[in-house]
Amino acid sequence: MGEICKTCGLPTELCACSDIAREEQTSIRVYIERRKWGREVTVIAGLSKDIDLKPLTKRLKKKLATGGTTKEGRIELQGNFMRLVAPILVKEGFPESSIELRD
């Protein structure tokens, strides 16, 4: 027998918690951080705790052909992909109105 979701009580195969969390997402901030030696990192912050960030990070890294990680509830991608991330997040099910690009 499969595992049961602690939030909704459905089997994990039928769980829709992450889909609901994506639709209810209020504010996603996408911005650039400068690191040592002038390297740029695209940071995606403000994602709901109900969303599993590891698979989302993996899909973003694959689509953008870059490295990255999940740290402290944020997704960090190596390089400046600020303008490319928003359309991918919309295709992943996040509302476009909740995505804020900060320069």
Image (tube, helix red, strand yellow):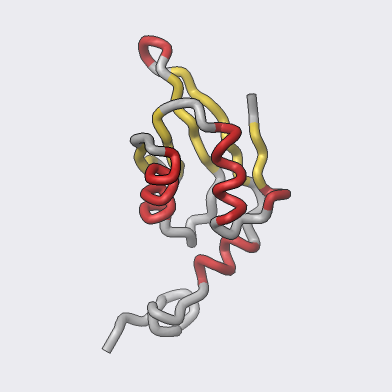
Please tell me in which quadrant of the rendered image residue 66 appears.
top left
Determine the residue positioned at 51% across, 39% down. 44
Please tell me in which quadrant of the rendered image residue 30 appears.
top right
Determine the residue positioned at 56% across, 32% down. 82
Question: How far from the left and from the top, in percent, is residue 42?
Answer: 49, 31
Q: Is residue 71 above or below residue 91?
A: above
Give the residue at the far right of this rendering: 97
Q: Is residue 17 above or below residue 24?
A: below
Determine the residue positioned at 38% across, 55% down. 55
Question: How far from the left and from the top, in percent, is residue 71?
Answer: 37, 40
What is the quadrant of the N terminus in the image?
bottom left
- Judged left or right of residue 26, residue 76 is left
What is the quadrant of the C terminus in the image?
top right
Question: How far from the left and from the top, in percent, is residue 19?
Answer: 55, 67
Give the residue at the far left of this rendering: 1
Q: Is residue 5 above or below residue 42?
A: below
Give the residue at the far top of this rendering: 37
Determine the residue positioned at 57% across, 63% down. 21
Please tell me in which quadrant of the rendered image residue 22 appears.
bottom right
Report how many numbered discs are placed on residues in the image: 0
Question: How far from the left and from the top, in percent, is residue 101?
Answer: 65, 34
